[in-house]
Every structure is written in structure tokens, then in C-alpha cells.
């Protein structure tokens, strides 16, 4: 018996059943989908100006004495790892099952699961880039990005997250990369939210039409909100 099976037999039983892994993909998908909405609402504070956005960034880092952001990171990372691992495992299993049974319906299913897996892996690459860009801040040293008004008013130095985002999205290559990544993210999201309702047993003949529209509408809202920021900065000169 593996050590995981010994210390956590329930987790092992869930992982070893196909429906268990499907539920894990759906439930972690719910958390990641809600994170996107929260992150979008927070990012839209940028339109309220430098001080509001920097207050918001400062709040994120200071809530629960600095522990809040770490709790969120651990939860998100766990959800991301479980979501990706369970999806890859289910895709492999489906592929093996289909090897001797190829018909039009399975070719179609194979295509959409391939699209989901490739858009998912691109999103993963984007998230790694994004964390290096705005969380690790490889190109934005704290000494160069100091909130000027805050220093003037309080005498204290704090990081100018607003200035960093404006500087980041003043580069056309970065903006194109973000728009491509967010388009893939939203295509993944609209399929993923539909599949999530299906797995959680909420999709019936009656609700299918409504839930499909809701998934597409949600993905479109997330896309418009996120894309509006780099476009406002680069194309309309917001923040300059
Ligand atoms: C216009 C689009 C976006 C902007 C302006 C933006 C902005 C930011 C900023 C400023 C941070 C750093 C927060 C801090 O540490 O103070 C951050 C972190 C993060 N963002 Fe975004 N973001 C955008 C899109 C996205 C998207 C589409 C995703 C998900 C696919 C995402 C996922 C994350 C994650 C996981 C973190 C790391 C949180 C952490 O560990 O600190 N972001 N974002």
C-alpha cells in the first residue's frame, strides 16, 4: 500500500475512481473560476486611480497580518495542481479506452479534449509568466516603483503596483501575449464551466440552454474585463 493510501485512504479512493477525479476537476474548477472573478474585480480598481489601486494591493498583502495572501496562494496552487493532474489522468484514461473504438462521436470528443488540454497548458505557462511579471516583479524593482503621493503624505515608502501595471502594459509585445492568453483562458472557461455543471449534475434538458448561455456570458465578461486593462493603457493611454 502506498504511503498516501495509508495516511489518507479517502483521498486515494476518490483519486482512483473516474467519477472522483471528475468531481475533483469540477470542484477545483469552481474555486479557480471564482478566483478569476475576484481577481478581475480587484484589478478593475485600477480605474479608480493610483492611490485606490495601491491601497488595494497593500490590503491584499497585509490582511490577516500578511497570512491572508499566503492562505490564498496555498489554496490556489493546490487547486491548480489537482485540476491539472486529474485532467491529464482522465485524458490518458479516455485515450486508452478509445484506442480500439474509433467513431465520429469519439473523434469529436477527442478534438475538444485536446483543445481543453492545450489551452489549459498555455494558461499554465501564462500564469508562470504572470507571477514572474507582477508578483516576483523581475523587471520592476521596488526602489524604482515608489508610490509618490503616499510618500509625500505619510513619509513612508510603499510599492507602486499601479505604476508597475501601467509600465508592464506599455509594451505592445506583452499586451499581445496577454490578450492571446486571456482569449485562450476564456475559451477554456466557457467549455469548462459547461462541463462543470454537467459533472455536478446540474445540467438537464431543461436547464442546458440557460447554463450554456451562462457559461459563455461569464467567459465573455471575464475576457472583456481583463482585456480592457492592457488595451486602455496601450491604446487609449490610460495612466500616462
Ligand atoms: C489585465 C489582466 C491582469 C492584471 C492587470 C493582473 C494583475 C496582477 C497583479 C498586479 C498581481 C500581483 C498582486 C500582488 O502580489 O500584489 C497579480 C497576481 C496574480 N494574478 Fe493576475 N492580473 C491579470 C490577469 C490574470 C489572469 C488572467 C490570471 C489567471 C489566469 C491571473 C492570475 C494571477 C495569479 C495566480 C497571481 C498570483 C497571486 C500571488 O501569488 O500573489 N491574473 N495579478
Image (spheres, rainbow, N blue to C red):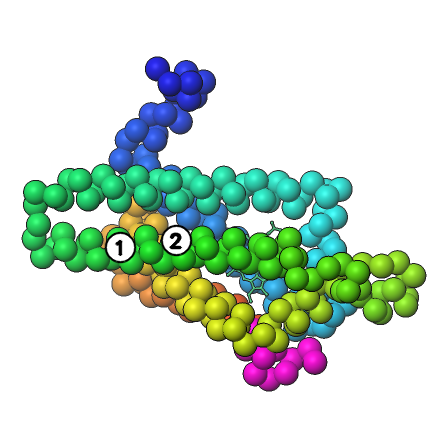
Side (left or right) of 232 relative to 201: right
The answer to if 237 sits in the magenta stretch is yes
User: At 34% from the left edge and 29% from the top edge, which residue is drawn?
Assistant: 14
Tag shown at residue 218: none
Q: Position of residue 178 (x, y in %)?
A: 50, 67
Horizontal side of 27 relative to 58 (left or right) equals left
Decide if residue 166 is on the left or right side of residue 226: right
Disc 2 on helix, strand or loop? Answer: helix
In the figure, is residue 237 to the left or right of 12?
A: right
Quadrant for the N terminus, please.
top left
Residue 121 got which mark?
2
Q: Say if the magenta span includes residue 225.
A: no
Quarter occupied by the C terminus: bottom right
Q: Which residues are magenta?
A: 230-240
Q: Residue shown at 52%/53% (left/top)?
A: 128
Viewer-side residue, 68 vs 199: 68
Residue 63 percent across, percent down from the top left: 72, 47
Residue 86 seen in the current view: yes
**Label of residue 114 in the image:** 1
List the single residue furthest toward the front: 139
Vertically, is 59 above or below 95? below
Give the image quadrant in which the ligand numbered 1 is located. Answer: bottom right
**Pointer 1: residues within 10 angstroms few (<14), some, or many (20+)?**
few
The image quarter in which residue 165 lies: bottom right
The relative height of residue 12 versus residue 70 in the rendered view (above or below) is: above
Q: Is residue 193 in view?
A: no
Local secondary structure at mark 1? helix
In the rendered view, would you say 105 is above or below 46?
A: above
Amino acid at each position: 500500500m502506498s504511503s498516501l493510501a495509508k495516511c489518507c485512504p479517502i483521498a486515494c479512493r476518490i483519486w482512483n475512481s473516474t467519477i472522483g477525479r471528475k468531481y475533483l476537476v469540477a470542484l477545483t474548477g469552481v474555486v479557480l473560476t471564482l478566483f478569476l472573478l475576484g481577481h478581475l474585480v480587484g484589478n478593475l480598481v485600477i480605474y479608480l486611480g493610483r492611490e485606490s489601486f495601491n491601497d488595494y494591493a497593500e490590503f491584499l498583502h497585509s490582511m490577516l497580518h500578511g497570512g491572508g495572501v499566503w492562505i490564498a496562494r496555498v489554496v490556489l496552487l493546490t487547486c491548480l495542481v489537482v485540476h491539472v493532474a486529474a485532467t491529464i489522468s482522465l485524458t490518458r484514461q479516455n485515450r486508452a479506452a478509445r484506442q480500439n473504438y474509433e467513431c465520429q462521436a469519439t473523434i469529436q470528443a477527442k478534438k475538444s479534449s485536446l483543445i481543453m488540454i492545450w489551452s489549459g497548458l498555455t494558461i499554465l505557462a501564462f500564469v508562470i509568466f504572470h507571477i514572474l511579471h507582477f508578483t516576483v516583479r523581475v523587471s520592476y524593482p521596488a526602489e524604482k516603483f515608489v508610490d509618490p503621493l503616499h510618500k509625500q503624505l505619510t513619509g513612508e515608502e510603499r510599492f507602486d503596483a499601479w505604476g508597475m501595471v501601467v509600465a508592464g502594459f506599455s509594451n505592445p509585445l506583452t499586451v499581445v501575449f496577454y490578450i492571446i492568453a486571456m482569449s485562450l483562458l476564456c475559451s477554456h472557461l466557457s467549455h469548462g464551466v459547461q462541463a462543470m455543471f454537467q459533472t455536478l449534475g446540474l445540467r438537464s434538458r431543461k436547464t442546458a440552454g440557460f447554463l450554456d448561455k451562462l457559461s459563455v456570458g461569464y467567459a465573455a465578461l471575464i475576457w472583456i474585463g481583463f482585456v480592457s486593462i492592457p488595451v486602455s493603457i496601450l491604446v487609449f493611454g490610460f495612466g500616462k
